């Protein structure tokens, strides 16, 4: 990481900590059956990962859930690569301010909407995704264990034995079907 990027991320983390102090939400566990709306946040830079997310969205749509997937593409301009469409929105480096904080109406709406479940499919360090997950108003947040997710998510899943998106999705589906309220 370059020195400038490191400073930018430190400034972003200071802003995130400040926003967290004002942040308050009620946590409520949901299983897939009980959830009415499900948000997915993921790193969409890798096409094969994006295809796995599409399969998950398709599964959730078959379960008659309102689903919105927000993908981060680690490039300056993703408009040539992908176009937002039903159930999918994207953001890239041009949507980050100088402190690497995601900005824009799509991101603000995603953070403010009280989804039943937020699924964070990021398992590598990525500050823009961390920012959105941490401040999301979702009632129940799920993600891989480790890093920021240990504090931001209500349910974390250990994937140290197999650090792959496919394994994480399988585990999340399994555990979200096991929850009984």
Image (cartoon, helix red, strand yellow):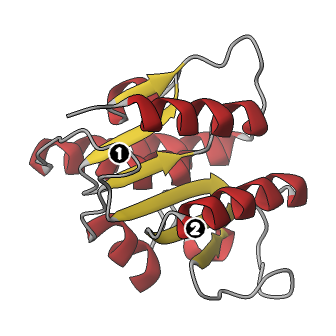
Q: What residue sits 10% from the left and 47% below the top?
A: 24
Determine contact: label 2, label 1, CB under 8 Å.
Answer: no
Residue 118 percent location from the top left of the image: 41, 52
Q: Name the mark on residue 134.
A: 1
Which of 107/84 is in front?
84
Relative height, residue 168 to residue 18 (above, below): above
Mark 1, other Cα within 10 Å: few <14 / some 14–19 / many ≥20? many
2 vs 1, front mark: 2
**Which residue bears the numbered disc 2?**
62
Which of 156/104 is in front?
156
Rendering quarter of residue 140: top left
Relative height, residue 101 to residue 20 (above, below): below
For label 1, the SS is: helix
Residue 89 percent location from the top left of the image: 59, 78
Residue 21 percent location from the top left of the image: 14, 42
Residue 105 percent location from the top left of the image: 40, 84
For label 2, the SS is: helix
Q: What residue sits 65% from the left and 19% below the top?
A: 159
Rendering quarter of residue 54: bottom right
Quadrant containing the C terminus is top left
Q: Is residue 116 left or right of residue 168?
A: left
Which of 102/89 is in front?
89
Say if residue 45 shows up in the picture. no
Quadrant containing the N terminus is top right
Q: Is residue 126 left or right of residue 65?
A: right
């Amino acid at each position: 990481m370059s020195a400038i990027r490191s400073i930018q991320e430190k400034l972003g983390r200071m802003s995130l900590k400040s926003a967290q102090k004002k942040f308050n939400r009620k946590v409520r566990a949901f299983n897939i059956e009980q959830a009415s709306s499900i948000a997915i946040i993921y790193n969409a830079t890798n096409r094969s990962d994006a295809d796995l997310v599409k399969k998950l969205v398709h599964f959730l749509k078959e379960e008659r859930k309102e689903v919105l997937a927000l993908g981060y593409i680690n490039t300056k301009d993703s408009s040539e690569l992908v176009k937002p469409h039903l159930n999918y929105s994207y953001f890239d480096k041009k949507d980050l301010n100088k402190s690497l904080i995601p900005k824009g109406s799509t991101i603000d709406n995603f953070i403010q909407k009280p989804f039943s479940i937020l699924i964070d499919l990021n398992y590598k360090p990525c500050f823009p995704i961390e920012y959105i997950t941490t401040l999301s108003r979702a009632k129940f947040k799920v993600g891989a264990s480790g890093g920021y997710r240990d504090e931001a998510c209500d349910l974390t899943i250990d994937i140290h034995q197999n650090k792959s998106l496919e394994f994480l999705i399988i585990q999340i589906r399994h555990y979200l079907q096991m929850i009984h309220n």
